[in-house]
Amino acid sequence: MTESQPLWTPGPDRIAGSRLRSFMGRVAQNCGMPGDDYASLHRWSIEHPERFWSEVAAFCDLRFDTRGEVVLTDADRMPGARWFPGSTLNFAANLLKFRDAHPAIVFRDEAGRRTELSYAQLYAAVAQLAGALRAVGITRGDRVAGCVPNCPETVIAMLATTSIGAIWSSCSPDFGVAGVLDRFEQIRPRVLFAADGYRYDGKRLDTRPALVQIAARLDGLEHIVVFPFLDSEPDLSSIPNARHWAEFIATSQATEVEFAELPFAHPVYILYSSGTTGVPKCIVHGAGGTLLQHLKEHILHCDLGRDDTFFFFTTCGWMMWNWLVSGLASGATLVLYDGSPFKPDAGALWRIADEEGITIFGTGARYLAAVEKSTFTPGASCDLASMRTILSTGSPLAPSSFKYVYSSIKSDVALQSISGGTDLLGCFALGSPLHPVYVGELQCLGLGMDVRIFAGDGQELPAGHKGELVCTQPFPSMPVGFWADENDAQYRAAYFEQFANVWAHGDYAELTERGGMIISGRSDATLNPGGVRIGTAEIYRQVERLDEIVECVAVGQDWKGDTRIVLFVIMCAGVALDQSIKDRIRRSIRTNASPRHVPAKIVAVTDIPRTKSGKIVELAVRSAVHGEPVRNTSALANPEALQFFRNRPELA
C-alpha cells in the first residue's frame, strides 16, 4: 500500500445513511446550494455563514427560548462579531431535552466499578442539585468550580450550575494545590465541588489535605461540596465550609429544573490555557456558540445519534471533557472513565468498549502510540463489533499509528484525527462520514470554518505548502473573551496580533490537494536550523516508527550563531541508546523527511515534561536546555522531568 492510497473508504450505504448527507440534501433544497459533495458544502458554508449556521441550528435541534431574526452582526470584525444577538437559550436545557429511560451516562473506573444513569434519572438529579444551589444564593454569572474525577456527579454539578446561568469551571484532582489555585484564584468561585479522592494506577489518592489548603486560599469561597469517591462516608471535619454531597442536596426538594433564559453568548464555561509560559489564561466560552459548534461536530462530522454509545478518554481538566458531555444534546449514551487506561493492562479501555458497545471511541494520539508499543493487540483480543469510529486528538497522530489502527485494532473503522483546541472549544479540522482515511491526514476542514494557511508575511499559501493555520472569518465558538481582561487586550494578543482581523491559531500545518490537512506541530515550537522552518511532528513521525523508542521530543538549541536540532528519546525498558540506534534514527529521518531534519544530537532521557492533559511541552524543554527558568511548573504533570534536560554535558 502506498501513501496515496486510502487506508479506509466509507461504503455507499454508510455515506447515504449519514446525517451529513441528509444535511446536504436539506441545504440543497432550502438554500439552493450548488453541488452535492463536501467541498461544495464547505465552500457554501463559508460564503453564506448566516444561512449555514441557521440551518445547523435547525437540523441539529438547537433549542432556543426566543429566536431572534438576526444571525450575525459585525461579521467583518474579529473579535467583535456577534452571533444570534436577539436570541436566548439555556445550555443545560439543551443537554437535558431527553428525559426518558434511555441510558445517559455509564461510569466505569479502573477499580471495576460501574454505575448507570438514565436521562430521566440525570434530569431528576440535576433538578435537586440546582435547587440546592439556588437555596444558597447561586445565581447567573456566579462561578462554580470543580476539582473532580470524571464521573456522574461532575456532569450533574455542571448541568445544575449552567441551568441557573452560573459559570462552570473544572480541573482534575491531580493538578495539585498550586495548579488549582493558579486557575481558581483568578475566577473566585462561590462553590467548589470535589471528591474525597481518586484512584490511579492502583493507588488511592486522598485529596482532602489539598482541599484544606485550597479552602484557606480561595477568597470568596462559601461552600465546598464533597462527594464520596474513595470512601462511602469520608471525614470532612478538617475542611472549612465543607459539606457532604448528600447533606447538601437534601436541602432541596426540587423535581423540576428552573432553566434560566439567557442570551446566546452568556458565559457557560471558563477553560484555561496550558499555563506553561505563565499563569493560565482564563478563556470564557459562551453557551450558544459552544452548543452550536459541538452539535455540528458531533452530528454532522461524527454522525452521532441516539443509538450511539460515545466515549472519550479524558479528565475534567481537558477540553475534551466539555466536548464529550455535549453529546447529551444528541441523546447519545456517554461512557465516562476515571483512572489509568493501562490498569490492569493495555486492554482496559478496549474491553470496556466491548462490554458497553461503544460506537465512537475517542482518545489522545499518545494513548494510541502507547498501545501500539505494548504487547496487547486490541483487534486480536476484543471483538469491537460495535465500534464505528475512532477519534484521536491532543497531538498529531503518527503515520505508524494510522496504520496500526487498521492492522491491529479494526480494519473497517473510520479513523478521525481531529484538531482544534481549548481556545475554540472545538475543531478547525476533523473527519466526516463521507471521506476516506489517508495516512497522516485529517480528513477535512470543519464546516463553517474558513481555515487557510498563511506565510509569515500574511500571504495565503496553496496546498502542499507549510505555514500558519489561520481562520479568516468569525465562528460561533470563538471565546466570549478572557476573564478580567480589560479591553480584550490579552484576547487580541493571543490570536489577532500576528495578522490583522485574522485568527492565528499557533499550529504549523499544510492543506492537501484532497482537501485534508497535515499538522506539523505548534508553530511556536518549530525548528529553524539554517533559517529553514521545520515542524517537530515531521521528526516524531520517523522516530516513533522504531520499536526501541517509547517517545521523543525535539527542540532547537542555540549553537554558534545558528540553531541545531537536539532529539531526546525515551528508550524501551532494557534497551540502551547506542550508536547503531542513533544511526538508524538519522537514516530514517534523512530518507523520509530531509537532511535538514536530522538532529545534531540524540540524547536518552527517562521522562519528558508534559501538561496535565498529556501534551509534551517543547518550550519547557527548550528553556531547560538553555538553562533558562521554566515559568509556572505547577502546570506540568511531571515537573521533575525537567532535571533530565538541564546541564547535559552532551550539549555543551
Image: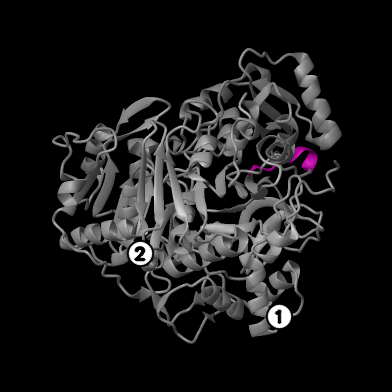
User: Where does the image place residue 388, in percent across and percent down from the top left?
Assistant: 62, 50
Circles 1 and 2 in contact, beta carbons < 8 Å: no
Crowd rating for badge 1 (residues with CA inside 10 Å; few <14, some 14–19, many 20+): some
Residue 522 left/right relative to 595: left
Q: Is residue 440 above or below residue 98?
A: above
Residue at screen point 31% across, 61% down: 123
For the N terminus, which image quadrant? top right
Front residue (pair 152, 43): 152
For the C terminus, which image quadrant? top right
Q: Quick one: SS at disc 1?
A: loop
Instruction: Give the residues in magenta.
Output: 525-531
Q: Which residue is mark 1?
A: 33
Residue 253 seen in render:
yes
Front residue (pair 564, 349): 349
Q: Which residue is mark 2?
A: 99
User: Where does the image place residue 575, in percent across and percent down from the top left?
Assistant: 66, 14
The image's colouring method is one colour
User: Where does the image place residue 273, in percent across and percent down from the top left?
Assistant: 48, 49
Front residue (pair 528, 298): 298
Residue 527 seen in render:
no
Q: How many marks?
A: 2
Q: Quadrant of residue 68?
A: bottom left
Tell me the amino acid under the disc marked 1.
Met
Q: Is residue 271 magenta?
A: no
Q: Quadrant of residue 149?
A: top left
User: Where does the image place residue 251, in percent across and percent down from the top left?
Assistant: 13, 56
Q: Is residue 566 above or below residue 420?
A: above
As measured in the structure, the alpha-carbon distance from the residue carrying label 1 to the one carrying label 2 is 36 Å
